């Protein structure tokens, strides 16, 4: 439990936070019609009578959307309802041509479930429900509001947590885990920049032993970093407002927006404007039935999830918690790692090459880049690691070879020869480099004779430099030690 001590009064406050996360499902078509579910098309080109709300048009449920929604439910350990139904959530806005959103009110398709944080604390889910997205109103291009209905009707799942979170870090971790899982199971891209993951925060504070105070909703949080910053700001704002002796300054039930430029939240709409959605069952859609067999199949087909992989990597491959976590957080990277280990038989080295070299090279190309686009297959990486293990290639030369593999798409064996990077094991050549490294190093030589082992490291460094990374460092060490003993 996180406690916040007020700077003004010294009183202890407890923040209470719940999250509502909307994720667009990665289907080919929309939830109730055949229009494409694809980001970035010309405005209003993916629209039909159903998703633009024409009279008499009838919705037909997309079974793929249900399949993906069920995967999410199973992955989060939710209880899937054998039957659920769709309801109309009525409100008026220019991006909602039907005049209502098709959602699930009192019978969502699943309830319960949750996500465990690294601390072992479990964040419980209240429910997940299915609904269709609204269109998009665009206010910032000239004096008029423009409407794009391409988004209208895209399938969403909204997952709602219990008020189990107590600080911004927990919220950040919960969102990171949720995103990992949804991406792993192919349910959603969870790309906040494209709006395929959107997060609202409910937040209030209470004093020890007292009731919860008024709840405030935060909207328009377009990155996990902003979620974190907005929560931190809002906790302080509410505490200060409650401690204000002027009661009219106390927090009120409202929706607030996070202003990213100023780092503050401000009122979007007060409670008086709260909607009465007049929910009622959608008469055009049948109930949703899910059989035990269907659920069982989905459970069987689900991939191993990130938390399980992290634990297995630490156990089976003896990787550090950090390495296991980096490798397991994306399915593509995790699958690549496992394939490369199968080839090289060396888990720790493989993990290092991926986390230190390949992922940095990928990140340099931008956040959207896939590992695959670097053009180094898992087998090719395994080959390079074997060359190092066999002594053909030094580690530092390996870095050059890997960079060249990314650049040219050639295999390591070819590049070692082309770049002349084969590790030098020839004693005569090594002795020459070692002799040169010892010139004028009387102090280092004396230190080594005194048993100060770290002095040898600097000399090996000299040899590696002189050989442009091609010397075998183990052999260089042997020769240097022999020379030191023989010296005078
Ligand atoms: Zn349509």
Image (cartoon, helix red, strand yellow):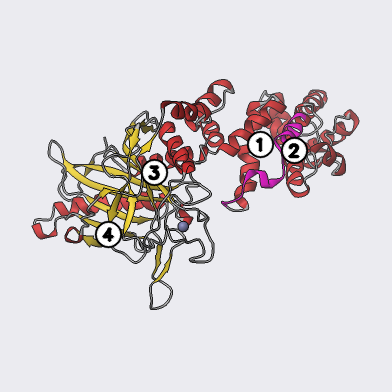
Please, is residue 53 above or below residue 332 in the view? below
Q: Are marks 4 and 2 in contact (CB under 8 Å)?
A: no
For label 4, the SS is loop
Per the model, the C-alpha gap separating discs 1 and 3 is: 28 Å
Q: Nearer the viewer, residue 298 or 342?
A: 298
Question: Which comes sooner in the sequence, label 3 or label 2?
Answer: 3
Residue position for label 2: 398
Tell me the number on the disc at residue 91. Answer: 4
Residue 207: horizontal and vertical position, in percent? 15, 41
Q: Which residue is mark 3?
A: 172
Prevailing SS of the magenta stretch: helix
Pointer 3 or 4: first along the chain: 4
Q: Is residue 160 left or right of residue 6?
A: right
Which residues fall within the magenta stretch? 367-386
Q: How far apart, in angstroms, are the residues tagged by discs 3 and 4?
A: 31 Å
Q: Position of residue 124 (x, y in %)?
A: 32, 34
């Amino acid at each position: 439990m996180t406690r916040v001590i007020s700077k003004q009064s010294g009183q202890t406050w407890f923040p209470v936070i719940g999250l509502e996360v909307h994720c667009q499902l990665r289907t080919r078509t929309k939830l109730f019609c055949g229009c494409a579910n694809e980001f970035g098309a010309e405005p209003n080109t993916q629209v039909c009578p159903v998703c633009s709300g024409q009279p008499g048009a009838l919705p037909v449920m997309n079974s793929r959307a249900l399949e993906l929604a069920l995967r999410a439910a199973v992955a989060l350990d939710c209880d899937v309802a054998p039957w659920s139904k769709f309801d109309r959530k009525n409100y008026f806005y220019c991006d909602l041509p039907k005049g209502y959103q098709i959602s699930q009110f009192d019978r969502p398709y699943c309830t319960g479930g949750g996500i465990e944080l690294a601390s072992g604390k479990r964040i419980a889910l209240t429910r997940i429900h299915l609904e269709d997205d609204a269109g998009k109103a665009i206010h910032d291009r000239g004096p008029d509001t423009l409407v794009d209905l391409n988004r209208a009707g895209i399938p969403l799942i909204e997952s709602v947590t219990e008020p189990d979170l107590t600080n911004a870090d927990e919220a950040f971790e919960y969102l990171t885990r949720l995103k990992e899982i949804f991406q792993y199971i192919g349910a959603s891209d969870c790309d906040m920049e494209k709006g395929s993951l959107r997060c609202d925060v409910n937040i209030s504070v209470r004093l020890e032993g007292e009731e919860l105070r008024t709840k405030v909703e935060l909207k328009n949080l377009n990155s996990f970093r902003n979620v974190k910053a907005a929560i931190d700001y809002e906790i302080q704002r509410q505490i200060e407002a409650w401690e204000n002796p002027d009661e009219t300054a106390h927090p009120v039930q409202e929706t607030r927006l996070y202003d990213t430029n100023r780092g503050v939240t401000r009122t979007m709409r007060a409670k008086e404007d709260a909607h009465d959605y007049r929910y009622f069952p959608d008469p055009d859609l049948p109930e949703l039935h899910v059989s035990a067999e269907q659920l069982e199949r989905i459970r069987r087909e689900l991939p191993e999830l990130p938390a399980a992989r992290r634990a297995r990597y630490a156990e089976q491959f003896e990787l550090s918690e950090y390495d296991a976590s980096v490798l397991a957080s994306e399915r593509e990277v995790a699958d690549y790692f496992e394939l490369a280990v199968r080839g090289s038989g060396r888990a720790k080295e493989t993990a290092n090459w991926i986390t230190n070299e390949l992922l940095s090279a990928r990140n340099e190309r931008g956040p959207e880049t896939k590992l695959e686009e670097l053009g180094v297959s898992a087998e090719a990486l395994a080959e390079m690691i074997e060359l190092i293990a066999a002594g053909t290639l030094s580690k530092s030369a390996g870095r050059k070879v890997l960079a060249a593999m990314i650049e040219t798409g050639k295999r390591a064996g070819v590049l070692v020869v082309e770049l002349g990077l084969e590790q030098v094991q020839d004693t005569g050549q090594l002795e020459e480099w070692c002799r040169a490294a010892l010139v004028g190093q009387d102090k280092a030589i004396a230190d080594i004779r005194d048993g100060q082992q770290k002095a040898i490291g600097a000399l090996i460094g000299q040899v590696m430099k002189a050989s442009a990374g091609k010397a075998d460092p183990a052999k260089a060490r042997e020769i240097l030690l022999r020379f030191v003993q023989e010296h005078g």
